Amino acid sequence: MTNNLKPIREFNLIQELNNYNHKKIKQNTMNFRLEQAANQPQMEELFGSYLQRGEISIIAGNTGDGKSTLAVQIADRITRQKGIWNEVNTQKYPIIYYDFEMSDQSLLKRYQSYTFESNFYCPDVSEIIKNSNGVFSIDTIKNDINTFDANIIFIDNITAMSQKSTIDQDSANKLMRGLKTLQSTYNTTICVLAHVPKIPSNVPLHINHVAGSKNIVNFADSVHIIGQSNQLPNRRYLKQVKNRNSEMESQVMVIDLICEDYLHFDFIKMDDERNHIDVDTIMEDNKKNKHIDIANELIGTDAIKYTDFVDNYAKKYNKSIETGKKAIQYLKLHNIIQQNESKEWEVNPDYLI
């Protein structure tokens, strides 16, 4: 009898192995990924497309530009079920804010007349580091997520954290890798603050301005930089320089730093970045006029797909595909072209010749 069962066992093992391989092959197909994505909940905006549920987002800025003030304001609104400009979000969420930047007295000076919600958690990072041999680790965040039942995390800021923690110089990259694992495993929403150097007043903000290794921004789903506007001393603008999950915002968000009762930003409008930096007006106008001509030559009164525009540009002007991509990006950023309901690009009526 034993000998009769042996072929059956071997057959069953082969069947199990085949089933396992078939399942493994299916799970690595593009169609399977699309099926999985279709069953996942839609991304929820917490601060417009600048911060969405399940994302790693970076807000960068120079010292004094207000990145911490903006981050606290975003976090505070999330705990109150409000968007940054008082629009109502779908749900009230608790958040954990790790502040490596400001002292208790600095916080008191800014928010003495303001009361935060009880679900705004701000652990003492000095105690955390002291009690963990000088290391701020992902395990610390995991423990706090369980303790506070919160999975929206703010870290202010990654540069200060690297300096205050006694781990090695590659700590920022290690932290970002850990945060990426945290994001994918627990669907954690993470907002990291970072530093940018002093940028000349005539230079547009760019993703390469974010201080530290390029790996830091590579790990992020979205990256935004606060710049100093040339219009008013308290005026800033927020520029989106990377957005993996939504279409890139073509204009900058203009905001004013207000100190009435407590420190916060007021939204002013969406605008073109060139209105807030010291540009060479004649040179910029010539460049814009040149691109208006290009838009009318390649699109005119019709509509065109992104890829078709890039291909046509490369052929007509004997340029590379990458140059064509830069051209359409310029047209989008300067609102010379706009997208219709079919996701094709048309010339803005204001610029039709």
Image (cartoon, grey):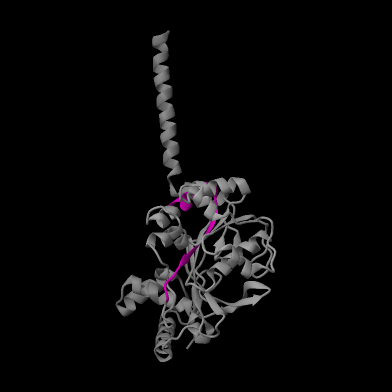
Give the tally of numbered discs.
Answer: 0
Depth check, front residue: 133 or 297: 133
Give the magenta-colored segment's residue range: 177-198
Where in the figure is residue 334, as x and y percent of width and height?
A: 48, 80
Residue 181 counted in the magenta span? yes
Q: Residue at x 69, y 67 (%)?
A: 114
Residue 217 counted in the magenta span? no
Q: Residue furthest left?
A: 318
Where in the figure is residue 233, as x and y percent of width and height?
A: 55, 83
Direction from residue 34 to residue 113 in the image, left or right? right
Q: Is residue 294 visible to us here?
A: yes
Depth check, front residue: 313 or 132: 132
Where in the figure is residue 266, as x and y percent of width and height?
A: 63, 75
Q: Is residue 320 above or below residue 28?
A: below
Depth check, front residue: 84 or 197: 197
Q: Is residue 219 above or below residue 138?
A: below
Q: Is residue 85 above or below residue 147?
A: below
Q: Based on the displayed image, in which of its 4 quarters is residue 295 positioned?
A: bottom left
